[in-house]
Structure formats: structure tokens, C-alpha cells
Amino acid sequence: MEVARETPQANVVRAWEPGRVRIGERWLEGSVIIAADRIMTEWAVDTVGEVDVASLEPAISLQPEIIVLGTGEDIVLPDVELMGALAARAIGLEIMTTAAACRTFNVLVHEERRVVAALLNPPPR
């Protein structure tokens, strides 16, 4: 599935499929954190149950106004306290499937918003 055109100024998700995401011409497997100017491939989170403020610290360190959390093929809500903890830091949290998070991230990047996508991307079922 093609999701967006590549822009030379920013990272955008060009394609997604279960287990991997394509930024530019590069396919990345597993969970990743993506900002307009940075890609973090060493995000060691495999399930929504592992997502908390500490695990999102690499994303938080980029000072986003919003974090788009992709939870795989299904929407799975993380710990209820996470949203409050991020709100206390003036960071919004949007939770959706990873495919929807990729599309939303692209739209917000094109709007020049300070957005970070934290994408859980387990292998296909």
C-alpha cells in the first residue's frame, strides 16, 4: 500500500505492511520511532503493554507537540495513565493502528507540526 510521496525535506512513510515500514527507499523492520528529521530503529518495544513514559523517552526527547502511537494491526490502548503523564508535559497522544498512524504522521509532517510517530510493527500474523 502506497501512503505518501517522499519529500526531500522530511521523513515520510512511503509504504507500510505488517512487520515493516518504508521511509524513502529504506524498509525498516520492527518497532521504530520516526520524526521529520530523525529515524530511531533501536526502539525495543514489542507490545502495547510495554509502552509507558520511560519507553517513550526517545520520542519525548524530540520535543513533539504530539506523539502518534501505532499499535499494530489492531487498536490496543496502553496504560490509561500514559495519556495523563504526557499531557502533563504538554504532549498529545493519538492511538491508532500502525497503518493509520503512518498516514496521520505524514499529514502532520506536511502541516509542519512537531510530530513523532512511535510505531509498533510486529511481524504479520
Image: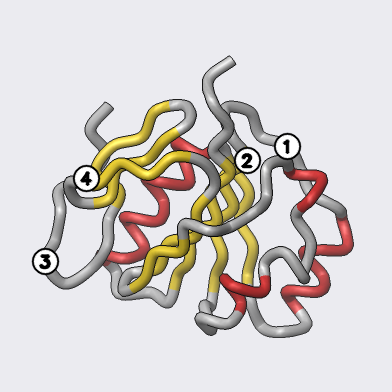
Image mark for residue 4: 4
Q: Which residue is mark 3?
A: 8
Secondary element at tag 2: strand
* Residue 77: % across, % down: 76, 43
Q: Which residue is mark 1?
A: 76
Quadrant in the picture for the C terminus? top right
Say if mark 2 contacts mark 3, CB within 8 Å: no
Distance in Å between CA atoms under marks 2 and 3: 27 Å
Q: Residue furthest left?
A: 8
Upstream in sequence: badge 1 or badge 4: 4
Distance in Å between CA atoms under marks 1 and 3: 33 Å
Secondary element at tag 1: loop
* Residue 49: % across, % down: 82, 45
Image mark for residue 71: 2
Inspect the image, locate mark 4, and give the three-letter code of the amino acid beneath it: Ala
Quadrant in the picture for the N terminus? top left
Instruction: Quadrant for residue 8, please give it.
Output: bottom left
Residue 46 or residue 105, whichever sits in front = 46
Secondary element at tag 4: loop
Which residue does the image show at 17% across and 46% down from the upper left?
25
Inspect the image, locate mark 3, and give the three-letter code of the amino acid beneath it: Pro
Residue 17 or residue 3, whichever sits in front = 17
Distance in Å between CA atoms under marks 1 and 2: 6 Å
Please give left or right for residue 114 compared with residue 74 in the image: left
